[in-house]
Amino acid sequence: MLVGARFRPFHQEEENMAGRSAAVVVVAVSGALGLAVAGCGSGTSSSAKTNSAGQTVVKVGVPLSLSGPVAFAGVQMQKAMKLGFKDANASLAASGIKLEPVFADDKSDQPTSIDVTRRLVQQDKVAVIAGYTASNICQAALPVAQQLKVPALNADCVIPDIVKMGDYIFRTAQPLDPALSLMTTKVAPQLGLKSSASLVLKENPGAVNAAKIMSAGLAKAGAPITDAESVRTADTTNFRSELTRIASKKPGALVIAVLGGQAGQVMVQARQSGLDVPFIGEQNLGASSVIEIAGKAAANTYFATYWNPTGGTPKNDKFIKDFKAAYNAEPDTFAANGYAAVETIAAAVKKAGKPSGDAQSYREKLKETLGNLGEIESIYGDGKLTMKDRAATMGAIIVKLNASGNTVTPEVIDTIPGDQVFAGWTGN
């Protein structure tokens, strides 16, 4: 393993589950809702549990993909969220509230995610949900949360327009589209690019969309795509013919928009084909699994992210330090997404105060509080995120990968404030 590798494949892979585009699933839900806070009861009665320390316990449902194809992301999220709940409860102690996470495995499966969401709300009686890993899981499960009228915060799915599913749906994980656009328009002039090429997994809508955004940004910056090559399937491992054709055109840079499991091999084969040019892509290019395969071939790679892998703020520095101490490993983007969701839930609960009245009234209070929480301290961006209209905005980070010997490490080359990143963005 290479020292300094901090990332795993990001959302373009798990979103579509190797290229499968999932339709939004709407499920008829029956049965009465139970209590929204820990305890027992039925209907709309209120009997919040008080623990031995005299704190009111509020249950938080945490559905994640802990097994199946997307477990590599869900497990990382769970690790970080456990740290997040520990930190949250320390900050909530003076308020007399304790968050109790109820973790559930959706097995990277849409029908299971629907069942898990029902169970968390109707049996475990959670007050709020924070989680979900893959975007096709969000598409299946979030409509259920909407129908059950429980606030649900998407922690990791990056498809646009999630909050348009309903007024109980929230997000801290945002699509990279605006960040990718800004990255390409900034990086191209810095590198003096006059042309570029792309290699895109055509069966994956996320990869196609990312490539489209980056291609538009490069064209705007005077470095248009002169050769667009495609990868047919997610199982493809040999890209030499496509990369040889690209190399013959002598582009100034290569846009890589494939699955995380393919990106490392693309990097190696691109260098072998004579493409000694910068690689540009979204943040799965900095994944630890990608760098392990690519080695020094990953050097001179540029990507956009909402989380600074080098720290940069006291809270993010602490998060990275605590994660390494707890798990003897570096955190990645999935871990950061999980932690950021917990810190957002904690801020909303702190502002809403202790549960009072019936169960659903507390859910409604959290819904109202979470939707326009405003600015909070965060590990994201430049140290803060802002919740407005049920969606978070935060600063974007542009990262370059450098190689020194056998070590590949990230370098932050630019931080863009959230108000600039999301100016005019309508894809919440």
Image (tube, helix red, strand yellow):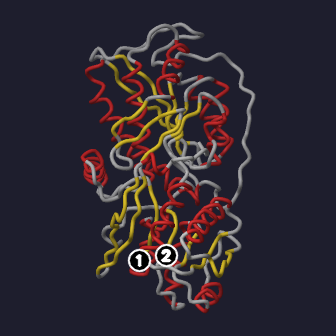
Q: Amino acid at mark 1?
A: Asn
Q: CA distance from mark 2 to mark 1?
A: 6 Å
- Say what secondary structure mark 2 lies in: strand
Rendered image quadrant of residue 28: top right
Q: Which mark is residue 300?
A: 1
Residue 171 location (% of width, % of height): 53, 39
Residue 87 location (% of width, % of height): 30, 36
Residue 102 location (% of width, % of height): 47, 32
In the image, 22 versus 414, the foreground residue is 414
Q: Is residue 427 above or below residue 167?
A: below
Q: Is residue 343 above or below residue 167?
A: below
Residue 127 location (% of width, % of height): 50, 23
Residue drawn at (54%, 68%) of the image: 261
Mark 2 crowd level (few <14, some 14–19, many ≥20, 10 Å Cα): many
Q: Are marks 2 and 1 in contact (CB under 8 Å)?
A: yes
Q: Is residue 308 toward the left or the right of residue 217 in the image? A: left
- Say what secondary structure mark 1 lies in: loop
Query: Which quarter of the rendering shows the C terminus?
Result: top right
> How many numbered marks are there?
2
Residue drawn at (53%, 78%) of the image: 265
Residue drawn at (29%, 82%) of the image: 405
Q: Which residue is mark 2?
A: 279
Q: Which mark is residue 80?
A: none
Q: Is residue 78 above or below residue 331?
A: above
Mark 1 crowd level (few <14, some 14–19, many ≥20, 10 Å Cα): some
Q: Amino acid at mark 2?
A: Phe
In the image, 419 versus 158, the foreground residue is 419
Mark 2 and mark 1 lie on one chain; the one further toward the N terminus is 2
In the image, 112 versus 15, the foreground residue is 15
Q: Is residue 214 toward the left or the right of residue 320 in the image? A: right
